[in-house]
Image (spheres, helix red, strand yellow):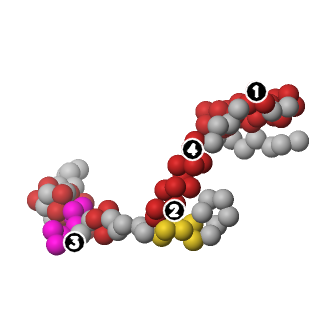
Amino acid sequence: MLQPWLTCDPVYFRSLALCLLPSALCLILPPSTHALPPPEDLPEEIMRGEIITEARSPLDGKPLTAAQYAEVQASLQTIPVVIEQLPPGLRNNLFLLRIRRLIRTVIPLPIKAF
């Protein structure tokens, strides 16, 4: 019995050509030519680099200027949160919420409240 490559079977040669053609094209064309955008295309990071001059208050949602927003952010960061002055039940709840947040960062499964 003759091997298939020794005979002139057109189906065999057609299937061989269909298998070898894509691999030959992959070897001829470098892969970076398909993945890169054209050089005149601007990156999205540069196109989004606009300066924001308007903001909303995190307290009540009113529109603020950039200077007013900076003042509100600075005042919010300087407000001291003293946990020792809170009632013991509320301190316990805050502690449990912090532990829950830590567990959610380690194990991202939904934790149902009872």
Residue occupying the point 19% across, 57% down: 31
Label 4, secondary structure: give it: helix
Nearer-the-camera pick, 80 or 95: 80
Lower sequence index among marks 2 and 3:
3
* Front disc: 3 or 4: 4
Query: Which residue is tagged 2?
Result: 68
Lower sequence index among marks 2 and 1:
2
Query: Which residue is tagged 4?
Result: 77
Residue occupying the point 60% across, 48% down: 76
Q: What distance separates the C-alpha of mark 4 from that of mark 2?
A: 14 Å
Q: What distance separates the C-alpha of mark 3 from that of mark 4?
A: 41 Å
Label 2, secondary structure: give it: helix
- Indicate left or right for 69 with 109 as reference: left
For the residues bearing labels 2 and 1, Cβ distance under 8 angstroms: no
Residue 114 appears in the picture as rendered? yes
Q: For the magenta stretch, what is the residue range?
A: 34-40
Label 3, secondary structure: give it: loop
Q: Where does the C terminus fall, quadrant-wise?
A: top right
Query: Which residue is tagged 1?
Result: 84
Residue occupying the point 51% across, 62% down: 68
- Indicate left or right for 104 with 39 as reference: right
The dot on residue 39 is none
Nearer-the-camera pick, 43 or 54: 54
Residue occupying the point 18% across, 57% down: 32
Quarter of the figure with residue 26:
bottom left
Lower sequence index among marks 3 and 4:
3
For the residues bearing labels 4 and 1, Cβ distance under 8 angstroms: no
Instruction: Please name the amino acid that badge 1 sits on.
Output: Glu
* Front disc: 4 or 2: 2
Q: What distance separates the C-alpha of mark 4 from that of mark 1?
A: 19 Å
Lower sequence index among marks 1 and 3:
3
